[in-house]
Image: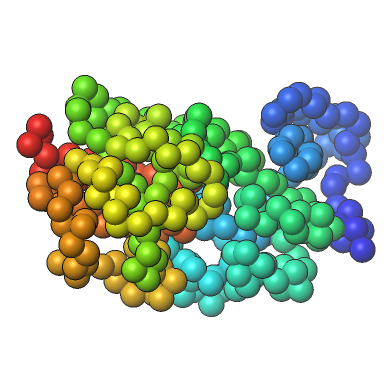
Amino acid sequence: MKWTDKPWVLAPLAVLAALVLQGCDEAPMEQTTSEPKAKSLVIHHNLGTTEISSTPERVAVLDMNEADFLDQLEVPIAGMVKDYVPHFLAAYGADSDVQDLGAITQPNLERIYALKPDLILMTPIQAAQYDDLSELAPTLHFDVDFRDSHGDHIGDVTEHLLLLGKLFDKEKLAESKAEELKAKVEAVHQVTEGRPETALIVMHNNGSFSSFGTRSRYGFVFDSLGVKPASRIADNSLHGQPVSSEFIHQANPDILYIIDRTAVMERRPVMRADQMSNPLLRETKAWKNGNVVFVDADAWYITAASVTSLELLMDDVIKGYRSSPSG
């Protein structure tokens, strides 16, 4: 069954024409009745084209970044995946009126169908299910690169925020949030600009480590936030480049950002510096100077591509400089 066969997502029959431009365009539609004019949005994204003929009212959310966008825009969520919900969205995870749509990596299509959504929001994590999802309802893909954010990651987040603002008639609120995000980026630059310290971003996973460099999912920390990398390692895998304690010791960063993936997967508090007894890490400049930041794992690992997560992430970046001898 095609989504166009479903009565809850049928487009108005009075549409005569819609202006289609690259990206997302809005045009009033001529109607044969005296009803208020509706809008039509035609959105081009990496997986195809999605046409929205009216403001969505029942939204299925398949990624926590998208859930945060809707939370920021004060848009109700009809259903979302609930396997890993960040602390700043915990109220949605606990709300029985927000239907559980399964897992982030494998959303439950039967539950989505039963939800009868008029819009599905997804990210590259669900790319393999795009065709099936599009059969259920108009499906919008968030064009963000979770493997290599080098370039304009924050710009991509801002653009998506403004797009959703237009889609849900929340333009002014979206613009206000975008300005707040821009101001936060500028505040980070005031801290990092001209600073000599180098930093390393590593993920801790049950005693093992992986590193994220300038062309990784956290590449934007270096090229958009002005943090100087302690290593030029290039890797665009989702979980980084596996590295040893010796590698971290040799890189000898001034600042060490540690993402505790184990805390996320085991749903426990993020570890503290005094709980990590690795002797080689304790010999780094970062450890000796007190510049080891165990970051907000929910913001960095589960999301990192939404308004709230970026703000929390930038707070963590700033923390790395506060104990520095140059600070």
The percent position of residue 25, horizontal first and vertical second, equals: 71, 28
Judging depth in this view, the residue of 3 and 253 nearest the camera is 253
As drawn, 185 above or below 168 = above
Q: Position of residue 9 (x, y in %)?
A: 81, 55
Q: Is residue 104 above or below residue 154?
A: below
Q: Which colour scheme is used?
A: rainbow
Task: Give the quarter of the image for residue 260.
Answer: bottom left
From the viewer's side, name the closer residue of 236 and 180.
Answer: 236
Residue that appears at 24% across and 50% down:
249
Is residue 321 at all visible to an observer of this figure? yes
Residue drawn 29% across and 50% down? Answer: 248
Q: Furthest residue to the left?
A: 325
Identify the image quadrant of the N terminus: bottom right
Position of 27 compared to 243: left or right?
right
143 or 146: which is nearer to us? 146
Q: Give the residue displayed 30% in from the left and 37% down from the top.
A: 230
Left or right: where does residue 185 sit relative to residue 159? left
Res. 184 visible in picture: no
Rendering quarter of residue 181: top left
Left or right: where does residue 199 sit relative to residue 55? left
Q: Is residue 249 above or below residue 110?
A: above
Query: Where does residue 217 sit, x and y in percent of width and height?
Result: 48, 45
